[in-house]
Image: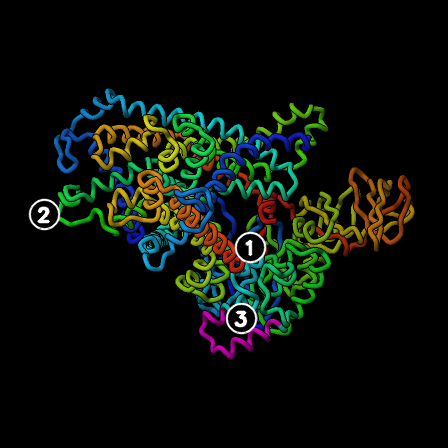
């Protein structure tokens, strides 16, 4: 896969508020890339820079190695699916989808054919005469997608496209979007605050916070090897405990020394220790590395979620077996399930 | 509580019955009577629509024509202004729209009278022309003067609703249009203009309706030969004393206006759809 | 492009303000003629103070405006409340009736009231004028109070009752503050419409009872006394000052809103705006 879009040191400031802080990002051709982060983290601004709706305060945007900072949206081979669809209320479904083709003065017969093809692709055959306000949220979503891909863009930008849909529809659309992306074979840049959505659909996930990229990687990398406490916490639930890294592969937290697999920290550096709830294993109290008391148990469908108090810290534990409240249990963690991170105070931009 | 609160509308219901409903029924009744006897007849309406003497129909036609021209001029002048206004920064926008409303706070008659000062044979414009050595213009007492008076008085009614509908357009739609390859001009004609249609509609209504029925502007600026339907009605009540005929013309005017309002709102409903609401 | 926009706006404003400027300028004209400039003078302002006709008309205008606005606000607010609690069908019917004077041409409203007065034998005079103004003012009060009632949370009244307020107390503590902006707006609208009205007053005022509009109308054809220029300049300045104070306050509100908006640029505020 070759490089398609590159953002170099992009900074975006509105008045005095810096929204993006030196973003460096490479997007490859035909990949499904997701910008993930809480609201206000700068993901939508990044998308709007790629779409041409914002010009970065400083830094450069390249498309196919051509600098496009000042190219207006209507001259970019990029199309957008807007957050609340932005369907034209005065046009019916057909005319909404045909809009870009009519503007580009595509011959009539071609318009007819291409609109039908893309309505077929999103599963809306026969809806062409409907007014946009007669459609359900999910259908409007599909029209917005059809309206964008009918123009054969090289990149499709999607700004939280599933945010307004209910859970069930959202799951369906996730699969649907992935299918469409593979069928059309173009790059998708997807913005969401939903980590599960990001992990299910993407080839590459870019985690952002406070206008800074925290980590870029495959979903598996991001989940298993979060680079810092923010990513760990944002991607799934985590136990984050303060600790001290004595030397390579040896960390102490919760009043005990543990073996781990991380290396390259300064001697006795204070660190954050991140442990996933499903990686804490329960045992009889005397067999665990730590022992504690069960505070609460909640059934979550597939597993139980237990809160266990041990050594001044309340651990969240996911387990298929449950222990009664008040029971004493032992806790242990395998070395490779212990993730060591530099302290969150000096968040690092992963570039 | 809600049962008792309902009763607070009773005084108004009575008031409306006496002062809104009854007078309209009375107009209808008077329109069906003539000076002779109490028998009801359609004579007044026959007189108005008399094919052998079309003097009244011609006045009605002139009223519609002058009002139509005034409305179109208002639209042509007002749309660009409303558009410019809608593109301004929020704070400037408030100041400027305030400046539009301000002249409307001056008494309607005085504003019209001020135009007489400008247009008269010895008025400001002709004085300026004379001092430049140019011949004076006959500006007063023409159909053009009536149109000017209408445009002057009703222009803000055209600008403000269009401006409102322009500012209501979702910025995302304009971005969507640009995203789909439309430059500024195409975006305007394909997206902005169609979406400002509700504003244009109410602008048309709010200028056309008062322009059709006015009798002050036509009287002050148009003189005798440019009488409109409003002047005719006024004359029946104030001079001629033929209340039956005056009432008949009022009924015709009322029906005309209510019908066109109805048509407009139906048109709006069909074309704008729920999406704009 | 920017220059073009500015020039266009300038021309439109010139068109809108030229007559007003002329009027104010001539109020300081030393000469009586409208065509000639006779030097700067306060002459017409002085003779205005002595012109009993104009002052009388001014007094009538203000009294009718205030009285009719007060009565219309009371009846109209009560009506809006009642209609809000009625069955849909009946309320819609009353609303349609309410729209009649708004949609009807003024001239039709004027002559219909004239016919009514003659029919039931009310003498044309001050009270007929006042009743007419109340009639065309009520609908505007109703139409500005109703949306407020509609926008109000239905449960706040019940919440007040639930918290121990009696119905009357709950009404004044909870509902009145909610709809007050609508009431004030309706009142101001009524005052303005009443002052500005000519057509309806023209048909419903008796001989000898004159408002400013009627005075201007009768003068306009015989030649307007320059005192009217002086009076309208004064009124224009008064309205301008009134509007400026109101608007400056509104402007400050906007600024305050903008500030809170910037301050609340936190993720939570943004997300609540996004959904």
User: Which comes sooner in the sequence, label 3 or label 1?
Assistant: 1
Residue A222: % across, % down: 68, 58
Tag in front: 2 or 3: 2
Q: CA distance from mark 2 to mark 3?
A: 66 Å
Q: Residues within 10 Å of mark 2 (few under 14, many from 20)?
A: few
Chain containing mark 3: A
Could you tell me if residue B179 is visible in this image? yes
* Outermost residue to the top: C50
Q: Residues within 10 Å of mark 1 (few under 14, many from 20)?
A: many
Figure colour scheme: rainbow
Label 3 neighbourhood size at 10 Å, few (<14), some (14-19), many (20+)? some
Q: Among all residues in the image, which is located at the extreme left?
A: B133
Drawn side of residue B47 relative to residue A150, left or right = left
**Frontmost residue, C243 versus C93:** C93
Question: Magenta segment, which residues?
Answer: A100-119
Direction front: furthest residue: B37
Q: Does residue B133 sit above or below A295 in this rendering?
A: below
In the rendered image, which quarter is residue A55 located in?
bottom left
Q: Secondary structure at mark 3?
A: loop
2 and 3 marks in contact (CB < 8 Å): no
The residue wearing badge 1 is: A44
Residue designated by label 2: B132
Magenta stretch: dominant secondary structure: helix
Q: Both on one chain, marks 2 and 1?
A: no
Q: Is residue B194 above or below residue A184?
A: above
Going by the image, does C146 lie left or right of A217? left
Q: Nearer the viewer, mark 2 or mark 1?
A: 2
Residue found 29% across the figure and 39% down from its top: B111
Label ID, residue A154: 3
On the image, the x and y values in percent for residue B224 come to 24, 46
Whether residue C188 can be seen here = no
């Amino acid at each position: 896969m070759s490089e398609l879009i590159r953002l170099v040191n992009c900074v975006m400031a509105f008045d005095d508020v810096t929204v993006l802080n030196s973003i460096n990002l490479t997007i490859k051709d035909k990949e499904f890339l997701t910008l993930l982060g809480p609201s206000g983290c700068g993901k939508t601004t990044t998308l709007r820079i790629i779409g041409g709706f914002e010009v970065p305060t400083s830094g450069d945007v390249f498309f196919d190695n051509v600098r496009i900072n000042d190219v207006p949206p209507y001259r970019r081979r990029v199309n957008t699916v807007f957050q609340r669809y932005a369907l034209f209320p005065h046009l019916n479904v057909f005319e909404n989808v045909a809009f870009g083709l009519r503007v580009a003065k595509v011959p009539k017969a071609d318009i007819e054919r291409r609109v039908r093809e893309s309505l077929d692709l999103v599963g809306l055959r026969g809806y062409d005469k409907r007014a946009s306000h007669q459609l359900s949220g999910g259908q409007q979503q599909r029209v917005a997608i059809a309206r964008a891909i009918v123009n054969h863009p090289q990149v499709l930008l999607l700004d939280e496209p599933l945010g307004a849909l209910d859970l069930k529809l959202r799951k369906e659309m996730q699969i649907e979007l992935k299918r469409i992306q593979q069928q059309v074979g173009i790059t998708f840049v997807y913005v969401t605050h939903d980590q599960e959505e990001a992990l299910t659909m993407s080839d590459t996930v870019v985690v952002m916070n406070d206008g800074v990229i925290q980590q870029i990687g495959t979903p598996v990398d991001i989940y298993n090897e979060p680079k810092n406490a923010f990513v760990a916490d944002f991607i799934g639930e985590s136990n984050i405990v303060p600790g001290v890294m004595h030397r390579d592969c040896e960390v102490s937290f919760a009043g005990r020394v543990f073996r781990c697999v991380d290396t390259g920290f300064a001697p006795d550096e204070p660190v954050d220790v991140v442990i996933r709830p499903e990686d804490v294993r329960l045992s009889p109290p005397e067999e665990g590395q730590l022992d504690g008391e069960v505070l609460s148990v909640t059934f979550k469908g597939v597993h139980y979620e237990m809160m266990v108090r041990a050594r001044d810290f309340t651990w969240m534990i996911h387990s298929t077996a449950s222990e009664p409240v008040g029971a004493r249990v032992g806790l242990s963690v395998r070395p490779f399930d212990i993730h060591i991170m530099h302290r969150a105070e000096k968040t690092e931009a992963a570039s | 509580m809600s049962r008792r609160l309902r009763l607070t509308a009773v005084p108004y219901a009575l008031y409306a019955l006496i002062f809104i409903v009854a007078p309209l029924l009375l107009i209808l009744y008077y329109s069906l009577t003539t000076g002779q006897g109490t028998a009801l007849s359609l004579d007044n309406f026959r007189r108005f629509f008399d094919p052998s003497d079309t003097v009244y129909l011609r006045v009605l036609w002139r009223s519609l024509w002058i009002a139509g021209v005034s409305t179109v001029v208002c639209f042509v002048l007002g749309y660009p202004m409303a558009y410019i206004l809608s593109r301004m920064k929020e704070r400037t926008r408030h100041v400027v729209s305030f400046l539009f409303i301000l002249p409307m706070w001056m008494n309607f008659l005085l504003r019209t009278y001020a135009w007489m000062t400008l247009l008269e044979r010895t008025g400001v414009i002709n004085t300026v022309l004379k001092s430049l050595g140019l011949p004076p213009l006959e500006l007063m007492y023409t159909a053009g003067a009536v149109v000017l008076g209408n445009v002057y008085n009703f222009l803000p009614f055209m600008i403000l609703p269009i401006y409102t509908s322009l500012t209501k357009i979702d910025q995302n739609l304009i971005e969507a249009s640009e995203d789909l390859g439309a430059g500024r001009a195409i975006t305007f004609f394909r997206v902005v203009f169609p979406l400002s249609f509700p504003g244009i509609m109410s602008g048309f209504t709010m200028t056309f309706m008062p322009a059709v029925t006015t009798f002050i502007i036509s009287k002050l600026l148009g003189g005798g030969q440019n009488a409109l339907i409003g002047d005719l009605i006024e004359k029946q009540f104030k001079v001629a004393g033929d209340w039956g005929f005056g009432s008949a013309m009022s009924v015709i005017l009322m029906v005309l206006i209510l019908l066109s309002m109805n048509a407009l709102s139906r048109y709006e409903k069909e074309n704008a759809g729920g999406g704009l609401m | 492009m920017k220059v073009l926009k500015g020039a266009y706006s300038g021309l439109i404003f010139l068109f809108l303000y030229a007559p007003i400027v002329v009027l104010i300028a001539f109020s300081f004209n030393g000469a009586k003629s409208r065509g000639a400039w006779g030097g700067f003078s306060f002459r017409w302002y002085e003779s205005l103070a002595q012109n009993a006709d104009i002052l009388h008309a001014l007094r009538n205008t203000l009294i009718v405006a205030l009285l009719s606005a007060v009565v219309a606000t009371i009846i109209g607010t009560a009506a809006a409340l009642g209609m809000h609690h009625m069955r849909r069908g009946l309320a819609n019917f009353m609303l349609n009736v309410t729209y009649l004077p708004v949609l009807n041409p003024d001239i039709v409203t004027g002559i219909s009231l004239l016919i009514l007065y003659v029919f039931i034998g009310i003498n044309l005079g001050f009270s007929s004028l006042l009743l007419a103004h109340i009639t065309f003012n009520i609908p505007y009060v109703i139409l500005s109070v109703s949306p407020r009632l509609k926008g109000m949370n239905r449960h706040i009244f019940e919440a007040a009752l639930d918290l121990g307020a009696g119905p009357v107390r709950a009404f004044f503590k909870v509902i009145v503050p909610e709809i007050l902006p609508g009431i004030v707006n309706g009142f101001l609208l009524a005052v303005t419409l009443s002052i500005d009205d000519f057509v309806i007053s023209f048909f419903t005022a008796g001989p000898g009872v004159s408002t400013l509009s009627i005075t201007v109308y009768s003068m306009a054809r015989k030649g307007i006394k320059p005192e009217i220029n002086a009076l309208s300049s004064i009124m224009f300045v008064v309205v301008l000052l009134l509007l400026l104070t109101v608007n400056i306050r509104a402007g400050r509100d906007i600024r305050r809103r903008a500030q809170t908006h910037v301050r609340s640029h936190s993720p939570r505020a943004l997300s609540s705006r996004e959904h």
